[in-house]
Amino acid sequence: MIRRHLPVLITLAVFIAGYLICLAQFPSFASTRVIGNLLTDNAFLGIVAVGMTFVILSGGIDLSVGSVIAFTGVFLAVVIERYGLNPYLAFILILGLAALFGAAMGFLIHAFQIPAFIVTLAGMFLARGLCFVLTTDSIPINAPAYGQITDISFTLPGGGRLTFIAIVMLLTFAAGIVLAHFTRFGANVYALGGNRNSAELMGVPVGKTTIRIYMLSSLLAALAGIVFSFYTSAGYSLAATGVELDTIAAVVIGGTLLTGGYGTIIGTLVGVLIQGLIQTYITFEGTLSSWWTKIAIGALLFAFIVLQRGLSAASVRSRSN
Amino acid sequence: MQPVTEQPQLLEIRGLTKGFPGVQALAQVDFTLHAGEIHGLLGENGAGKSTLIKVLTGVFRRDAGTIRLEGKEVSARDPADALSLGIGTVYQEVNLLPNLSVAENLFIGRQPHRFGLVRTGEMRRRAAELLTGYGLDIDVANPLSSYSVAIQQIVAIARAVDLSAKVLILDEPTASLDAQEVETLFGILNRLKSRGIGIVFVTHFLDQVYAVCDRITVLRNGRLVGSRPIAELPRIELVSMMLGRELAAEALHRNQRPAVSGEPLVAFKNYGKSRLIEPFDLALRPGEVVGLAGLLGSGRTETAKLVFGIERADSGQAFVDGKAVRLASPRDAARLRFGFTPEDRKTEGIVAELSIRENIILALQAQRGWLHKIPRAKQDEIANRFIKLLDIRTPDAEKPIGLLSGGNQQKALLARWLATEPRFLILDEPTRGIDVGAHAEIIRLIERLCEDGLALLVISSELEEIASYSDRVVVLRDRRHVRELSGNEVSADTIMTTIASH
């Protein structure tokens, strides 16, 4: 039982240890203000990471999410500001478009047996390219709806604010947990990651599941894009470059096996928070370059991948004994 | 026992024909399975057993013939469709999902649910209940991979049967089980049989055929040889049905030879590795065959891996020609002119996509170094020489090795090492999963090799076989070399009593 959850427990231990270190150095880390900001600042990363967890659990990868986030921002900025579309209608429109985009990628991956890496790489270039077709400028979004939405927040005891976008992220995680662990779809995702052939022989609808997985990933990337546009109040073609890699890192640090089949959604939340924690620490520290975040993430990623190899080797050994 | 022929016909196959380019895999095969019988499907490799099963379960399309299940003509599109028709298959390599829990494996695709959510508690309760019926009391919430192959196989059977299987096909289910696990499996098969399920049982072990089958059907070269109740079929007749010729006595008994004398070619003193195998002494002279016998997990393969440098010993010393040598990797071993054909042909032996020629020259090329490519003409010469010498059945040397039958793959692996002109060859289960005919050929080959002065270390689970060609037999138990038998002591009976003794 403990063995099964070991990767998540280790991730959690790393987070707690990191938090305690930060706390020892900067007592204000205990304030709800810092915690509230940690959630708000990483809301878009968390949302897209939920989708990525499903993709990686199924043994795939989705490199297009960063571009989809940028495209969402640009699309919203253009249709709301230039064409005066109702923002809520624009949200529905972009979510629908993204779902179609993801479904198309999933279809290509399944129908032609093309590696997900290649298909989503193409998707990445396509979405990023489309951003530039729409506009090359950074367009601010000043629609009143945006102000209303960003104003929604709960005040936490101690003065921190749980913002709307943080709530969206937490709800996304809750929905992700239910979807992964308590539905047939979730079991099918794990089944694909375990062994695609066996899954097919056992009657798992491989094609349908694959299409839905990438649809979900793109849909959540668009949701993350909407949240990102609240956060920055603008749409910019070069936004969110490399976010797909941050996301993959968060998922892996969260204890999901990059080869698929093993992992949890809750682990991904902790993985995202660890990244946020490092970022916050560096901001508090003041003298370090923000690139140290990347270095720390890189080191952690290495450590976790080595750890996963070790764990799976150990479990193989224990079975053969 | 009630006469099985009075049971209704469950599955009726008539005139089944299937051809592949260049091969007639099945020709006008009839097969009848009754409800409540265990039906052994036997034949040499290449006889058409796998093709028959694959056509039946919808992996391949048939060229001609009819398949009737309970009187209705059926035609499965794929294995999932076959399962929904009531034909379930359990393969030797369990085709379940190791990362999912046992309960999920049993119920995937039909989990009990409410409002779109899986009722995990209910699913686990039902899974546990289901497995209790198979005498299995395990935590169904644990991942399948945390259990042994035997338990995984029972889970696979339970799943197939629970999915309303009327026909259960078991493709060599016992190949990786030990004796006790086989007993358990047979208990389960007998219980399923009494419930009226028809079971098709594919195996290479004749003992098991007699232990559990009611009836057998033998195929040879894609044709039906015959279908007989097992009770009235003498063993020798069954073997001759499979081989299509009388079994020659020489296949099973080695000509008595004078004991090999002289200095050992290779010797291991107090050689061992903690947690893997206890230190042992072992010496082989040129021209000598030493057998390693013992139950599954007794340390036979571990001994072989240590001797070939795949595992590094942490005690003792290896000697070749009386001189101490370093044996820290398979490269070291190959340099000392050792050869090794592993137990798991498919994953550790052959490179399935490469041609027979490329597979044969692999070890030789590796030995020469990759910068000194063996000229193509020389490669062809070597490959063709061994194909002829070992009678590897293939149209030509360029066919991917993965398309050959098990026995021919094994011969090609032997050729790979023979091409390097080894002095010491380790064969781990050289006859596993190989039909009786190829079996005898490989044994004859082993004998020929040692006449040429090669020292051979052979691992086998088949005691009769190992007793027939070994000069000496080392018996292992619980990761320890317990006794070395030589001379007249070498017999299946002594090996068995040594394994069983305390």
Image: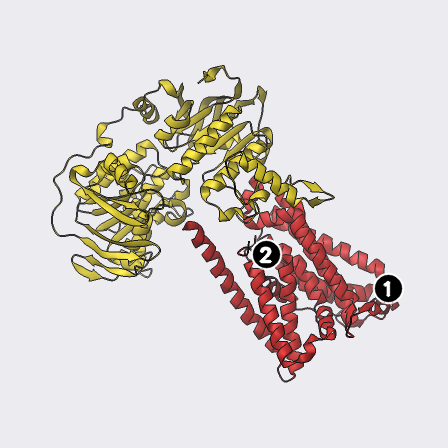
Chain colours: A red, B yellow
Question: Is residue B359 shown to the viewer in this render?
Answer: yes
Query: Which amino acid, by three-letter code, is at mark 1?
Result: Tyr
Residue placed most toward the observer, A123 or B327: B327
Badge 1 density bin: few <14, some 14–19, many ≥20, Cα 10 Å: few
Residue assigned mark 1: A83
Q: Chain of mark 2?
A: A
Question: Is residue A113 shown to the viewer in this render?
Answer: no
Residue placed most toward the observer, B175 or A199: B175
Query: Which amino acid, by three-letter code, is at mark 2?
Result: Gly
SS at circle 2: loop
**Outermost residue to the front:** B502
Image position of B210 (left or right of B283): right
Expressed as whole percent of the image width and height from the top left, the position of residue A12 reads 60, 65
Q: Are marks 1 and 2 on the same chain?
A: yes
Q: Quadrant of residue A71?
A: bottom right
Residue displayed at 40% across by 19% down: B228
Image position of B291 (left or right of B51): left
Expressed as whole percent of the image width and height from the top left, the position of residue B300 reads 31, 47
Residue placed most toward the observer, A316 or B478: B478
Residue displayed at 39% across by 43% down: B401
The relative height of residue A49 versus residue B351 in the rendered view (above or below) is below
Q: Chain of mark 1?
A: A
Residue placed most toward the observer, A268 or B44: A268
Residue displayed at 86% across by 67% down: A148
Image position of B489 (left or right of A277): left
Sequence-first disc among 1 and 2: 1
Q: Nearer the viewer, mark 1 or mark 2?
A: 2
Residue assigned mark 2: A263
Expressed as whole percent of the image width and height from the top left, the position of residue B369 reads 31, 60
Image position of A103 (left or right of A149): left
SS at circle 1: loop
Expressed as whole percent of the image width and height from the top left, the position of residue A285 reads 64, 82
